[in-house]
Amino acid sequence: MAMSATELEAYILKAFPDAQIKIDDLAGDGDHYFCSIVSEAFRDVPRVRQHQLVYNALEGHMGGKLHALALRTSAP
């Protein structure tokens, strides 16, 4: 079962309530997304750690319900 863009956004907003999020379904299958996230939580945090924070926000669904997620993270 794939993850909808709405569900993906909900997980991200739960962890980063101030986030500005743009999600693109790369393959049209609900399984391969590109996600741009802007949040104050990323300020002064190394890029690798920013991505780890996003993966943690997905509560274990990365690699299962969600197959591929390309990220662009930044602070406002």
Image (cartoon, rainbow, N blue to C red):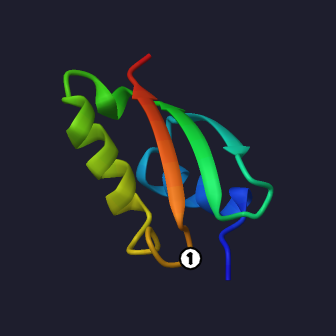
In the displayed structure, 75 sits above or below 28; it is above
- Split into 4 quadrants, where in the image is the N terminus? bottom right
Identity of the residue furthest to the front in this view: 27
Q: Label 1 crowding class (10 Å Cα cut-off): few <14, some 14-19, many 20+?
A: some
Q: Residue furthest top?
A: 76
Q: State the residue position of label 1.
A: 65
The spot of residue 57 in percent (x, y) is: 39, 59
Residue 10, given in percent of the width and then of the height, sits at 60, 58
- Mark 1: which amino acid? Lys
Residue occupying image coordinates x 30% and y 50%: 53
Determine the image quadrant of residue 62: bottom left
Q: Is residue 36 visible?
A: yes
Residue occupying the point 33% across, 44% down: 51
The secondary element bearing badge 1 is classed as loop
Q: Which quarter of the figure is the C terminus placed in?
A: top left
Q: Image height check: is 46 above or below 34?
A: above
